[in-house]
Image: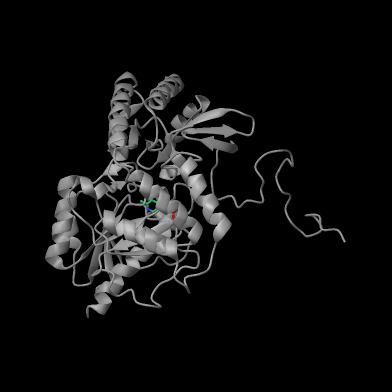
Amino acid sequence: MSSSPAALGKAPRSASDTAGPSAAVMGTYARQDIVFVRGEGCWLTTDTGERYLDFGSGVAVNALGHAHPKLVAALQAQAEKLWHTSNLYRIEGQETVAEKLTRLTFAERVFFCNSGAEACEGAIKVARRYHYVSGRPERQRIIAFRGAFHGRTLATLAAAGNEKYLEGFGPTAGGFDHVDLGDIEAVEAAIGPETAAIMLEPIQGEGGVRSASQDFLKAVRALCDTHGLLLVLDEVQTGMGRTGKFFAHEWVGITPDVMAIAKGFGGGFPVGAVLATAEAAKGMTPGTHGSTFGGNPLGMAVASTVIDIISEPGFLETVRTRTLHLKQGLEGLKDQHAAVIEEVRGAGLLMGLKLRSRVTPAQVVKAAIAEKLLLVGAGDNSVRVLPPLIVSEEDITQGLHALSQALTRVSHEII
Ligand SMILES: *Cc1c(COP(=O)(O)O)cnc(C)c1O
């Protein structure tokens, strides 16, 4: 029996049927035509042996770079023992990681999942359930911010409210009110008898590295306290040392009631978590939430090691030193390439370049690739510069040089 695509009535695999991206992968991404086959530290190697300096960290995921020996060892050791049992049973790794997180943060309870979107969904559920079990079931609405990104599930898309991502996917999940980042009067005006929580990223990553000011975050915390609302922070991108503190809210001196984490948490292994105070999590009783793979032993072995490394004495101090170098370098590039860069933004190793309106993020990303440097585009006409936290001084120097060359290329294009 023939099972050729034609016999099965299928479209050909690709237009040309020559080497190139396979049409068998659903076309949801506008990918660069590069295949990486190895990584070490801040460097990636392609299938043709070319080396790229990774200043994108897989979008803030590879916090400890590629193939960190301790993460490799942790994963291998766990892989030989046990991969999966299920949340029907106690999982040692979850208890270890939850104890570490509660020691190091505001949190007293941790729920494990597999991604940032799942962590944000979980955080939303925790917030609504808290009011429900507190005898205020009408408190279901969540105030969120324009330009936010909380993931691609139906509820997290509704939370961010970005029309572009919601288009064509049916009814938008309800219960979210949107205001502008930084507009505290608008936040206060949006609070009503049905408000359950205020949810935000301390720095909007996908939205273009737009920081909420410390004063704004403090005022939001105060509004939550005054009105009995929960403060939900999405630190999926800003957490795990990315800004030079374990979590970005530590710069402000406030704590949330609920927090979503993922990305750097697994250093490349898919794992996320919802962190909460005992009070905020009081509604999360047996049967209220779950995840088959959440807190899987493999993910926990890696996440535990990531936490250990980031919390080693001196680790975050070094990140802050690297930050100064990177930031100064980027400011210098802004002066040199004022026709391309409008503003340098961000904190720690989550930096952004807001581009002039005649330049696109795709143009800069492409020019950087030509210089063997990886950057990540973002909203608000910007690109992100987010090297692994283990980046060396030499790699920053080299990355800034490559970026300078890339910006020169872009300047020539726009003249
Ligand atoms: C990436 C991101 C998410 C979504 O994470 P996924 O793992 O892609 O689901 C949510 N919130 C923020 C702030 C993010 O940066």
> Which residue is pictured at 29% across the width and 38% down the height?
314
Q: How many numbered badges does the structure rendering display?
A: 0
Percent position (x, y) of residue 387? 40, 35
Q: Quadrant of the N terminus?
A: bottom right
The image quadrant of residue 348 is: top left
Q: Quadrant of the C terminus?
A: top left
Examine the rendering and report whether any part of residue 84 can be seen.
Answer: yes
Instruction: In the rendered view, tell whether residue 122 sits above or below residue 242.
Output: below
> Which residue is pictured at 58% across the width and 37% down the height?
36
Percent position (x, y) of residue 380? 35, 41
Percent position (x, y) of residue 170? 46, 65
Examine the rendering and report whether any part of residue 343 can be seen.
Answer: no
Closer to the camera in the image, 12 or 217: 217
Check the image and tell me how it is coloured.
one colour
The image quadrant of residue 310 is: top left
Instruction: In the rendered view, tell whether residue 355 sits above or below residue 151.
Output: above
Instruction: In the rendered view, tell whether residue 160 sits above or below residue 362.
Output: below
Closer to the camera in the image, 364 or 128: 128
Closer to the camera in the image, 331 or 79: 79
Closer to the camera in the image, 104 or 313: 313
> Which residue is pictured at 37% across the width and 55% down the height?
150
Percent position (x, y) of residue 229? 20, 66
Residue reaching furthest to the bottom: 135
